[in-house]
Amino acid sequence: MSNNDDKNLKLLKEQYEKPVMSDKAVFEMKQRMEQGKEEKRSMSKKKLFKGLAIAAAAVLTILILPNISSEVAQAMGNIPVLGGFFKVITIRDYQYEDERNVADVVLPEIKTKEGTDNSVTDTGKKTADEINAKIREIANKWVEEFKSNLEGEGYQNITINSEVINSTEDYFTLKLICFWSGGSGYEENHFYTINLNTGEKVELADLFKEGNDYKRIISENIKKQMREQMAADEGILYWIDNEEYPEWNFKEISDDTSFYINENGEVVICFNEGDVAPASMGTVEFTIPMDVVANILK
């Protein structure tokens, strides 16, 4: 997907109403996305540098603002404790509602425990500031786009919230979820994976031995899963094996491809709507079997 494609979300959604599209329909959709900047409202999405450094232990605390019910506050307060250095605070950052427009933006913010001073915690504080700034950047872009469309004739609804994926003793992931709807819907997710043992941010490459070809190995397995899914269900379509327009085919993950580690210690590769499949497929994930990468994991 090109940067121009990313800037024309509404048009992309409208073009992907059907789960299966012909090559000609996909080609026409691609052309129209390039033209959509001037004729359709756009909602930009930008890739986020993944990462978040934290100290060896982390505590997850949710602060609920007064406009959230006490029942919800109590339920959210029961989220499992992760440790004792970091906490994730949720803040209702922006809220708006009229007859045609609704926005509810609740952002996670990484906080560090006061009164600690060592190299690990210093790194964690700096990285927390970095991640908070990147989350703020994403939210600001969505809110500004929302505000720019308030005078339009259509309907729009945006929500931004987050989820902690508590996976293993070594890792957990903070997931930022951004959703837009206006007749149809669009969702994009951003993932921040944390190493609880080192307090360092985790990039995908950090999980594998140096000098290996992890991107090719993982990509080949993703392609295999795509083909198997398409063969099993005619309602599933990925951009792969298209001989007429090979430039659209999924080729390989990048250093910035989103991921998290599930409860079984497996790497899960994550794509936003429109990245490797029609937007009607939604956000898609591929769990990489352990035996595929066992020989190259650190």
Image (cartoon, grey):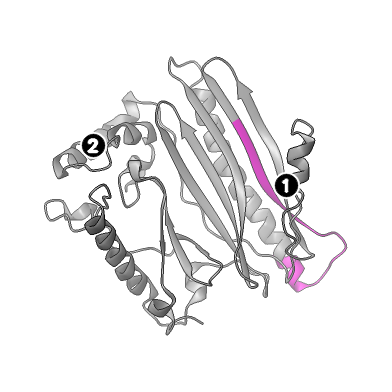
Q: How many marks?
A: 2
Viewer can see residue 64: no
Q: Position of residue 85 (x, y in %)?
A: 78, 64
Look at label 1 and name its amino acid: Met
Q: State which region is magenta.
A: 104-123
Residue that mark 2 sits on: 29
Q: Residue at x 28, y 34 (%)?
A: 15
Residue 81 is covered by the magenta coloring: no
Q: Residue at x 50, y 38 (%)?
A: 179
Please, what secondary structure does the residue beneath circle 2 have? Answer: helix
Look at label 2 and name its amino acid: Met
Question: Residue most toward the front?
Answer: 232
Q: Mark 2 near mark 1, Cβ–Cβ under 8 Å? A: no
Residue that mark 1 sits on: 76
Mark nearer the N terminus (2 vs 1): 2
**Depth check, front residue: 159 or 204:** 159
Question: Residue most toward the bottom?
Answer: 295
Left or right of 1? Residue 98 is right
Q: Residue at x 55, y 43 (%)?
A: 138
> Residue 194 lies in what quarter of the image?
bottom right
Q: Position of residue 240 (x, y in %)?
A: 23, 57
What is the number of the mark on residue 160? none
Q: Is residue 204 above or below residue 229?
A: below
Q: Position of residue 7 (x, y in %)?
A: 39, 37
**Depth check, front residue: 69 or 183:** 69
Q: Residue at x 53, y 66 (%)?
A: 262
Viewer can see residue 148: yes
**Depth check, front residue: 73 or 239:** 73
> Residue 160 lies in what quarter of the image?
top right
Q: Position of residue 216 (x, y in %)?
A: 32, 72
